[in-house]
Image (cartoon, rainbow, N blue to C red):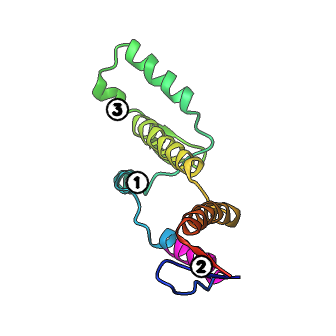
């Protein structure tokens, strides 16, 4: 039995169509531009990352304790300017501005959380996902071709 379409031409290459579709889909996924929201978010993260370039987390400093110390200083009558000038010494003997350290630490943690959230929200396609999608489309195309074909014995 031969299959002929409405134009009288033979239809061939049944094996090559899914392979070609798979290659085109994979190529489209690689070339697809990123959404503009991700670009804006990346630019914002880049600015925060630049401002935190010299920041390093000091494991011996307890941020909650620093916040409590600043709160106690405010309650005891320190002005906001004096609170911002409070410095502490870490275990290495380095002087650290407590207020700036807390603000930079909070920015650092937000940046880390946004990176983790972005990583969790990424969608990874497996070869099985691509094959399933192609098989679904292929069945629909085959059904539409069957409606348009004439069978000749």
C-alpha distance separating marks 2 and 3: 68 Å
Quarter where residue 50 is shown:
bottom left
**Residue 91: percent from left, percent from top:** 61, 44
**Residue 45: percent from left, percent from top:** 40, 52
130 lies above or below 52? below
- Which dot marks residue 38? 1
Q: Residue at x 54, y 33 (%)?
A: 63
Few, some or many C-alpha atoms within 10 Å of disc 3 (few <14, some 14-19, many ≥20)? Answer: some
C-alpha distance separating marks 1 and 3: 35 Å
| Residue highlighted by disc 2 | 17
Q: Please, what secondary structure does the residue beneath circle 3 have?
A: helix
- Mark found first going from the N terminus, 1 or 2: 2
Q: Residue at x 49, y 26 (%)?
A: 67
**Residue 4: percent from left, percent from top:** 57, 81
Few, some or many C-alpha atoms within 10 Å of disc 2 (few <14, some 14-19, many ≥20)? Answer: few
- Dot in front, 1 or 3: 1
92 lies above or below 13? above
Specify start and end residues of the magenta stretch as a single range: 14-27
Q: Please, what secondary structure does the residue beneath circle 2 have?
A: helix
Picture mark count: 3
Q: Please, what secondary structure does the residue beneath circle 1 have?
A: helix
- Dot in front, 2 or 3: 2
Q: Nearer the viewer, residue 134 or 96?
A: 134
| Residue highlighted by disc 3 | 84
């Amino acid at each position: 039995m031969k299959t002929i379409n409405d134009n009288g031409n033979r239809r061939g290459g049944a094996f090559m169509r899914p392979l070609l579709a798979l290659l085109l889909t994979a190529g489209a996924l690689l070339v697809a531009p990123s959404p503009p929201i991700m670009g804006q978010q990346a630019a914002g993260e880049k600015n925060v990352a630049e401002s935190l370039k010299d920041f390093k987390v000091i494991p011996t400093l307890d941020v909650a304790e620093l916040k409590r110390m600043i709160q106690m200083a405010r309650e005891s009558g320190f002005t906001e300017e004096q609170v911002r000038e409070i410095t502490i010494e870490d275990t290495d003997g380095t002087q650290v501005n407590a207020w700036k350290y807390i603000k930079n630490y909070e920015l650092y943690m937000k940046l880390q959380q946004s990176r983790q959230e972005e990583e969790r929200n990424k969608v990874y396609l497996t070869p099985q996902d691509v094959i399933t999608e192609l098989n679904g489309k292929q069945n629909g195309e085959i059904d539409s071709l069957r409606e348009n074909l004439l069978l000749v014995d």
